[in-house]
Amino acid sequence: PDPASSHPQMEEVPLLRGSNCRAKGAAPGFKVAILGAAGGIGQPLALLMKMNPLVSVLHLYDVVNTPGVTADISHMNTGAVVRGFLGQPQLENALTGMDLVVIPAGVPRKPGMTRDDLFNINAGIVRTLCEGIAKCCPKAIVNVISNPVNSTVPIAAEVFKKAGTYDPKRLLGVTTLDVGEVLGLDPREVNVPVVGGHAGVTILPLLSQVNPACSFTSEEVNHLTSRIQNGGTEVVEAKAGAGSATLSMAYAAAKFADACLRGLRGDAGIVECSYVASQVTELPFFASKVRLGRSGVEEILPLGPLNEFERAGLEKAKKELAQSIQKGVTFINK
Ligand code: NAD
Ligand code: LMR
């Protein structure tokens, strides 16, 4: 079925490209779907993906408000053709033919909540969306943003295993953090590997591996580690009940999606931190630097040398991570 027909407002688009019109069709590029596209992350992410020259087709799916968001985004004069899809009956059309699916669907935290407190609602949402992916675009690269990422990525993996479509190289949890401002350095110049997972003590910055190299006192290391682990919580508290990080997250997710697309295109040397199926530790999932390529995650890079503080952090992270992974696996197999 033609996805364009799934949204009446979008049928106007071909009329703008009549036979007298010199405008060409969609530029060659990748097809990207955003699931949860009308949300706090979804909307600015849709805007940023519409600006990405690697994207030829952009599908915006949500259970509310996609007609308005899609109409709005479609007025941006960039190359990607945008289509809106509203509600579960249109999920399959939203997903068919996609190269990359980005999932920011689900509820965000309020002050006092952990990411795990979102499990009861978001686990079911991610399951349903991944069932759709397994059916309609089993070869797509999947970027999971919905929290708790430590559990939603294992949930996605279990759904894909059940459907017989699981390819660990194509499933990536988005865990990108930017700590430049905290370090007092130009954020464009600083790279901090953040490994482990994506909640509290599982977020493990390797400050001994900051690039370009910086040296910190143990007081600074304690302070920076805690700021990085609580970066999301700082935003939740500042928003005082109105949600969690959306704008910075959309930016991080758009950069991460772009890295995945450049990998698919065959660019060399693309390395990002991501929460993926991994053998870096004894846990089945772990966030670390990965090299992206045509098939998704082509190489998981080793953690590198850890100092004593980081080794202690790793042990704490693994304990919590193991429980979150198991919780996700059990949710699908119970
Ligand atoms: P939001 O409430 O503003 O938006 C979520 C959107 O998801 C809404 O538009 C909602 O209608 C939609 N949605 C709900 N159920 C759906 C379904 N079944 N199918 C499709 N769409 C559905 O929330 P937000 O601020 O955009 O955050 C979204 C998620 O991202 C939260 O779980 C949040 O914790 C998480 N998050 C993760 C990171 C990260 O680093 N991985 C960062 C920030 C937020
Ligand atoms: C995150 O890092 O997951 C986001 O900032 C959202 C949150 O709940 O902290």
Image: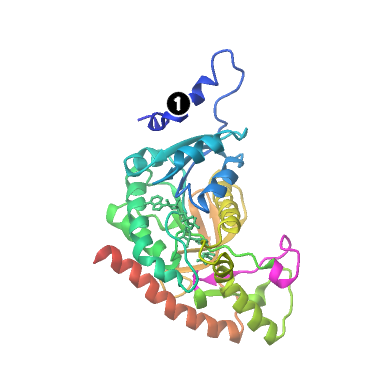
156 relative to 318, above or below: above
Q: Is residue 253 left or right of residue 208?
A: left
Q: Residue at x 36, y 51 (%)?
A: 129
Tell me where residue 98 appears, x and y as whole percent. Answer: 44, 41
Q: Quick one: 84 or 156, which is closer to the camera?
A: 84
Mark 1 lies on residue: 11
Q: Which residues are magenta?
A: 181-199
Q: Residue at x 57, y 40 (%)?
A: 50
Q: Provide the secondary structure element on which disc 1 rests.
A: helix
Question: In the current view of this chain or complex, which residue is farthest to the top?
Answer: 20
Q: Quick one: 38 or 331, which is closer to the camera?
A: 38
Tell me where residue 57 appears, x and y as whole percent. Answer: 51, 36
Residue 322: say if magenta. no
Give the main secondary structure of the magenta stretch. Answer: loop
| Residue 116 visible in this rendered orientation of the protein | yes
Which quarter of the image is occupied by the N terminus? top left
Tell me where residue 62 appears, x and y as whole percent. Answer: 42, 46
Give the amino acid type for the residue marked by disc 1 in the picture: Glu
Q: Is residue 173 left or right of residue 223?
A: left
| Residue 29 visible in this rendered orientation of the protein | no
Q: Is residue 124 left or right of residue 312?
A: left
Q: Quadrant of residue 77?
A: top right
